[in-house]
Image (cartoon, rainbow, N blue to C red):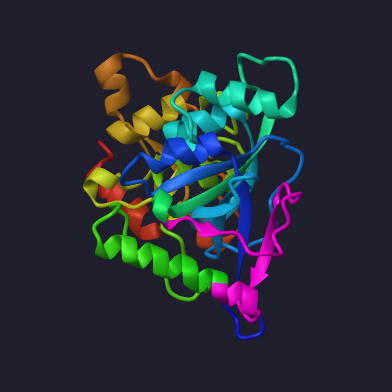
Amino acid sequence: MSNDVPPRYYVAVTDRQWYGFLATRSGLDEVNFWQPGGTRVFRALEPGEPLLFKLHHPEHFIVGGGFFVRSVLLPVYFAWDAFGEKNGAPSFEAMRQRIERYRRTPADPAGTYLIGCVLLSEPFFLAREDWVPAPDDFHPNIVQGKTYDMRSQTGRRLWDTVQARWRAARVEGVGEQEVPFGDPVLVRPRLGQGTFRVLVTETYRRRCAVTQEKVLPVLEAAHIRPVSAGGTHRIDNGLLLRTDIHALFDRGYVTVAPDGRFRVSRRLRRDFDNGELYYRFQGREVWLPPEADYRPSRRLLEWHADTVFLG
């Protein structure tokens, strides 16, 4: 964080069922803090700043938190596909029904409408005895949340209290997450699988890098170097690909060369006596994000070409 930006965090009003479901799960690396309206993107924080969870009144307590990565508007079905139970529900149907009760709209079994998705990394949940009373200035009629500045007495005192409660719980062996605390300064959040999928999808403008396909349900975030082979959930280790292209990429029948061109292995025709659909893209330059930091790592593309691609 630059010196002219004061440390801050956000206290968000939280769905009780969402909190209760996730608080019983261990080892969570990410969660989707969804907002049912689906009309605006959450803009109160910068990536890496903390967001604390406060239950609806009359349960006027801070009960956990996480670290902001990004906010996007997504169809409900896509949010479920990306995060599953990390959406705070045991099933897609349960999640959808809860959202629709808030929206007060007719049921949509396909879940095609948009919701706000606030993506958080390294979530933590306080045990009931460690819940922190909300500050006096957090009025019960606040329905979304409130930003706190660490330079204010109230903001500093609340943060210190939450931090102390969580540290004490860890010393006593309650919970399994690492303690992510210090002052709430801007850090680079570690991405989980769901957040990786969403960020790659958004970075590539919801289009397949090879075919330019725009039908969202058939697009997948592919790891260039799989996590099982030492890869990480970084945007520069990702490509947005149509499902069939993704399958062929993972099996080495196609690759994206370090020069950004699509290559198809001769093995595709030999092994399946087919593949004309894919050979027509041979040598074509794939679409890559304009932001240099988000483009595929040349080192990782070389790894895929040398290690996975069948040549």
The stretch of residues the image draws in magenta is 130-157
Of residues 262 and 161, which is closer to you in this image?
161
How many numbered marks have been drawn onto this rendered protein structure? Answer: 0
Q: Is residue 297 above or below residue 1?
A: above
Q: Say whether residue 256 is visible.
A: no
Q: Position of residue 223 (x, y in %)?
A: 37, 43
Q: Quadrant of residue 148?
A: bottom right
Quarter of the picture containing the C terminus is: top left
Q: Answer left or right for 285 relative to 163.
A: right
Q: Quadrant of residue 95?
A: top right
Q: Position of residue 59 (x, y in %)?
A: 58, 46
Q: Position of residue 266 (x, y in %)?
A: 30, 29
Q: Position of residue 142 (x, y in %)?
A: 74, 51
Q: Answer left or right for 296 relative to 27.
A: right
Of residues 110 and 277, which is closer to you in this image?
110
Specify whether residue 204 is painted magenta: no
Q: Residue at x 32, y 21 (%)?
A: 269
Q: Residue furthest bottom?
A: 3
Of residues 34 and 203, which is closer to you in this image?
34
Q: Residue at x 36, y 46 (%)?
A: 28
Quarter of the picture containing the N terminus is: bottom right
Q: Residue at x 71, y 49 (%)?
A: 144
Q: Quadrant of residue 15?
A: top right
Specify whether residue 146 is painted magenta: yes
